[in-house]
Amino acid sequence: MQALAPALESDYYVVFGASFLKGRLVDFLIEKRAINIHMGASPYYRGNSCNFWAIHDGHADYVSGTIHMITKGLDSGPILLHALPRPQAVDPFLLGMISVDVAQNSVVHHIKNGTLYDLQPVPQDRSLELRYTKNVEFTDDVAARYLGVRPSPEAIRGILEKRDLSKFINPFVM
């Protein structure tokens, strides 16, 4: 905590790309109402490489970022919003990168407008989980199979145009 002291004097706390938070740090972040950017549509896709697995499973419409409150559980906090890329013809790999940009921009948008904490946190419904993945599941064979069947940019556009926004919390589309 002492080493982090200069970074722990802020109006907002945003965690992105961190490993499992524990101890005094997670307690501090919970107290400060910190948020996490999880790359994937929680609670549908949880764990590692969620946007890859969404496309792998034929669910490019779930490629997104989830902005949720920090809790002691791993990516399990109440959701403030889902950040979703707008429908477009794009390579599946780039769709994942675009979703990172949209997620970051959604947080910036709500902080600038002073509306981040106006969003009502919604508890995650674990019964909706489609896949929970660990790093060990991403193998060379999985990658090769994916490369052989990944959707075209036009197919991605079609999937995103048909996306059901009612499945997402406070959808922020950009």
Image (cartoon, helix red, strand yellow):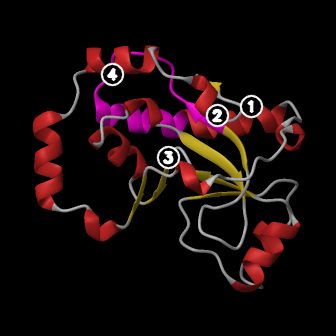
Q: Residues within 10 Å of mark 4 (few under 14, many from 20)?
A: many
Q: Position of residue 139 (x, y in %)?
A: 18, 62
Residue at image mark 3: 40
Residue 149 lies left or right of residue 116; in this view the side is left
Q: Residue at x 60, y 45 (%)?
A: 66
Mark 3 is surrounded, within 10 Å at the Cα level, by few (under 14), some (14 to 19) or many (20 or more) other residues, namely many
Q: Is residue 92 above or below residue 74?
A: above
Quadrant in the picture for the N terminus: bottom right
Where residue 70 sits: x, y (%)?
72, 62
Which of the image's four quarters has the C terminus? top right
Amino acid type of the residue tagged 2 in the rendering: Asn
Labels 3 and 1 touching (C-beta < 8 A) = no
In the rendered structure, are the residues bearing label 3 and label 4 in contact, judged by CB atoms less than 8 Å apart?
Answer: no
Amino acid type assigned to the residue bearing label 3 in the image: Gly
Using the image, determine if residue 174 lies above or below residue 110: above
Q: Nearer the viewer, mark 2 or mark 4?
A: 4
Residue position for label 2: 105
Disc 3 to disc 1, C-alpha distance: 19 Å
Q: Are marks 2 and 4 in contact (CB under 8 Å)?
A: no
Per the image, is 96 magenta? yes
Q: Separation of disc 2 and disc 1 at Cα? A: 6 Å
Q: Read off the residue under disc 1.
A: 109
In this view, the mark in front (3 or 2): 3
**In what element is the residue under mark 4?**
helix
Three-letter amino acid code at the position of disc 1? His
Element at label 2: helix
**Mark 2 touching mark 1, by CB under 8 A?**
yes
Q: Is residue 43 visible?
A: no
The residue that mark 4 highlights is: 156
Mark closest to the chain's N terminus, 3 or 1: 3
Boundaries of the magenta span: 82-101
Mark 3 and mark 2: span between their CA atoms? 15 Å
